[in-house]
Amino acid sequence: MRIAFSSCMSAVSFPQQPAWQEVAARQPDVLVLLGDSAYYDVGQGASVGAIKEMTANQFAQHAHGRIASQLAQPDFRALVQMPGLETHAIWDDHDFLWNDACGADVAKQPAWAHLIPPSRAVFAAFRKALAARLAPGSYPAAPFAWPNNVPEPGYSTVQLAHKVLLHLTDGRSYKSRRGSGPLLGQAQLAAMEAACAAADPATVHLIATGVVFDARNGETWLDHKHEYDRLLALAAQHRIVILSGDIHDNNLASYDLPGGRRLFETTSSGAAVRTGVTIGALQRNWGLLDIDDGTVKIEIFKSGVLQYQGSIDRAAWQ
């Protein structure tokens, strides 16, 4: 089974997205989008300030248009429509509201809280279109008649071949700023722990998250130490690979745990952005997992060149 993954793309600012041709050439079975599938707050006059001044309906139309642009990008569209491909997406700050927006904090702000329901509705429509491989009518036409009662993306799992369980997390709806507040929140963490406990002990767990686990810059799991420690404890009992995005760069890391087991993290971010979204070096980053009953093989590509690779023995988890 072959799983491709990446994050961070803007068809508005970067209408050419050759990374998807490279991914398609490797014929993946699954594509995982790790957030920032559109940049609501960047490009063509958009900004954080402008988003904050929008009505709910204005934001719904704006976000709908940004996602529509990405779905219409020819190389992305051709990839998602490949026969047999499953595509799964989570959201992060730029396809939630704006840079570093945290749902738990925004919900407490009367001036901005009205933007959350249309954001949920647009992202739900995006997921529906991906699941349908962009079949005609799977993404609603403009103007977007958004419902007001769509739930947050939340936490879910997808059972894949070769005893692989994909965990799709929601790192925006419950997130607060750094400190003692939540990242995923108690309900998601408990559900993840229960899903791991219920799975076959030989299962490989892929945890899709918008932010990196342990880097010391930007938003990280380490900013939320209680949840960071809970994921470490979970990884001490189960075979876990974190799939992360956000940083407009790639990385491959492992963390030694008590008892000899290791936690692995593979990061790929910047399918079609620059290091500073619209400034800096142009990024063309994506990753690939090849998983069979014995091995998890990892390849991460930057600008068409293999940057990192590794192999995990499933039995030893080393």
Image: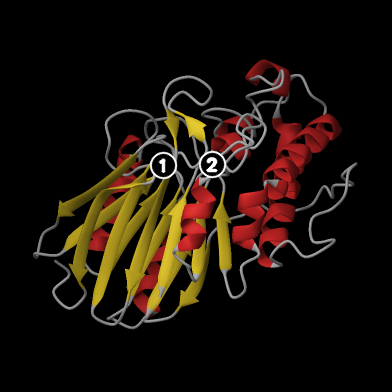
Q: Residues within 10 Å of mark 1 (few under 14, many from 20)?
A: many
Say which element carries label 2.
loop
Q: Quadrant of residue 118?
A: top right
Question: Which residue is the site of mark 2?
Answer: 92
Q: Is residue 261 visible?
A: yes
Q: Amino acid at mark 1?
A: Val
Question: Is residue 222 rendered to the left or right of residue 278?
Answer: left
Q: Is residue 170 visible?
A: no
Asked whether 29 or 118 is in front, the reply is 29
Residue 284: assigned label: none
The picture places residue 302, in percent across and down from the top left corner, at 36, 42
Question: Is residue 139 rendered to the left or right of residue 41?
Answer: right
Residue drawn at (79%, 61%), measured in percent from left and top? Answer: 138
The picture places residue 66, in percent across and down from the top left corner, at 72, 37
- Tell me the CA gap for discs 2 and 1: 8 Å
Q: Amino acid at mark 2?
A: Asp
Residue drawn at (27%, 66%), measured in percent from left and top? Answer: 297
- In this picture, is 201 found above or below 11? below
The picture places residue 73, in percent across and down from the top left corner, at 67, 46
Q: Residues within 10 Å of mark 2 (few under 14, many from 20)?
A: many
Say which element carries label 1.
loop
Question: Which residue is the site of mark 1?
Answer: 211
Residue drawn at (77%, 65%), measured in percent from left and top? Answer: 135
- In this picture, is 217 found above or below 261? above
Q: Earlier in the sequence, mark 2 or mark 1?
A: 2
Whether the residues at callouts 2 and 1 have beta carbons within 8 Å, the answer is yes
Quadrant placement of the C terminus = bottom left
Q: Quadrant of residue 125?
A: bottom right
